[in-house]
């Protein structure tokens, strides 16, 4: 699916995203260019087009997994659009009750994500949603949590892929759909 075809009614979703996602220099640390999606979220037609594009072409999905934190904002309306449940994948210690946890490497250290042990039924077909695919560590850890639950990862859909960071290499064989590649 091309970025031009991704939007509802033929909307050029890549152009919408370029217009409504702003770069914030040196955030959260010097040298980083943060992709701020809040202008997109504040624009009703742009946000709707993004949700429609993230959901497009995903049939036979049982659950949508949103990756903390901005992935939640996108995944919940995608789940509603697809008529399926939403599952939050959270940072360590944020979910009550029994969880599966997966630790992954960051540039300097590690991080852990969790999901409730009963979030997915065996055989569930799961669409993962996040705002940005960067190095792929969080997405790979999320995919492992889903598989550990006996469910199947169908695809990862993101607003933006930062291709220069090589995130796809962390997700071999996975269907990855980015609405905007940078």
Image (cartoon, helix red, strand yellow):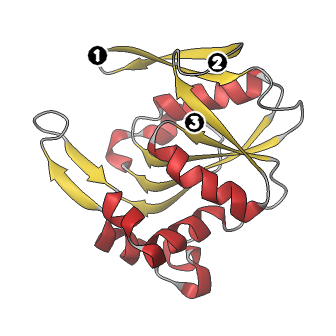
From the viewer's perspective, is 160 left or right of 59? left
- Packing grade of label 3 (10 A; few <14, some 14-19, many >=20) is some
- Packing grade of label 2 (10 A; few <14, some 14-19, many >=20) is few
**20 is higher (above) or lower (below) than 74:** below
Residue sitting at x 50%, y 78%: 4
The reply to whether discs 3 and 1 touch (Cβ–Cβ < 8 Å) is no
Residue sitting at x 32%, y 69%: 20
The reply to whether discs 2 and 3 touch (Cβ–Cβ < 8 Å) is no
- Disc nearer the start of the sequence (2/3): 2
- Disc nearer the start of the sequence (3/1): 1
Q: Position of residue 144 (x, y in %)?
A: 66, 25
Determine which residue is flagged by label 1. Answer: 108
Question: Which quarter of the image is occupied by the N terminus?
Answer: bottom right
Q: How many marks?
A: 3
From the viewer's perspective, is 61 left or right of 90? right
Circle 2: element type: loop
Q: CA distance from mark 2 to mark 1?
A: 28 Å
Residue sitting at x 71%, y 67%: 57
- Packing grade of label 1 (10 A; few <14, some 14-19, many >=20) is few
Whether residue 1 is visible: no
Judge by depth and name the residue closer to the eye, 115 or 141. 115
Q: Position of residue 7 (x, y in %)?
A: 55, 77
Determine which residue is flagged by label 3. Answer: 171
Q: Position of residue 46 (x, y in %)?
A: 44, 74
Q: Nearer the viewer, mark 2 or mark 1?
A: 2
Circle 1: element type: loop
- Disc nearer the start of the sequence (2/1): 2
Q: Position of residue 123 (x, y in %)?
A: 89, 36
Determine which residue is flagged by label 2. Answer: 96
Whether residue 152 is visible: yes
Q: CA distance from mark 2 to mark 3?
A: 28 Å
């Amino acid at each position: 699916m091309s970025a031009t075809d991704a939007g509802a009614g033929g909307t050029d979703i890549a152009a919408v995203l370029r217009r409504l996602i702003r770069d914030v220099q040196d955030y959260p640390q010097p040298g980083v260019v943060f992709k701020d999606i809040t202008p997109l979220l504040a624009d009703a037609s742009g946000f709707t087009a993004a949700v429609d594009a993230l959901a497009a072409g995903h049939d036979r999905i049982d659950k949508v997994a949103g990756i903390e934190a901005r992935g939640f904002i996108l995944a919940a309306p995608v789940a509603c659009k697809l008529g399926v449940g939403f599952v939050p994948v959270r940072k360590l210690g944020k979910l009550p009750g029994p969880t599966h946890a997966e630790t992954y490497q960051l540039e300097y250290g590690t991080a852990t994500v969790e999901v409730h042990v009963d979030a997915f039924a065996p055989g569930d077909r799961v669409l993962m949603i996040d705002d940005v695919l960067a190095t792929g560590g969080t997405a790979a850890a999320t995919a492992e949590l889903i598989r550990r639950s006996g469910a199947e990862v169908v695809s990862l859909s993101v607003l933006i892929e930062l291709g220069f960071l090589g995130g796809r290499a962390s997700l071999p064989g996975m269907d990855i759909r980015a609405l905007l590649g940078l």
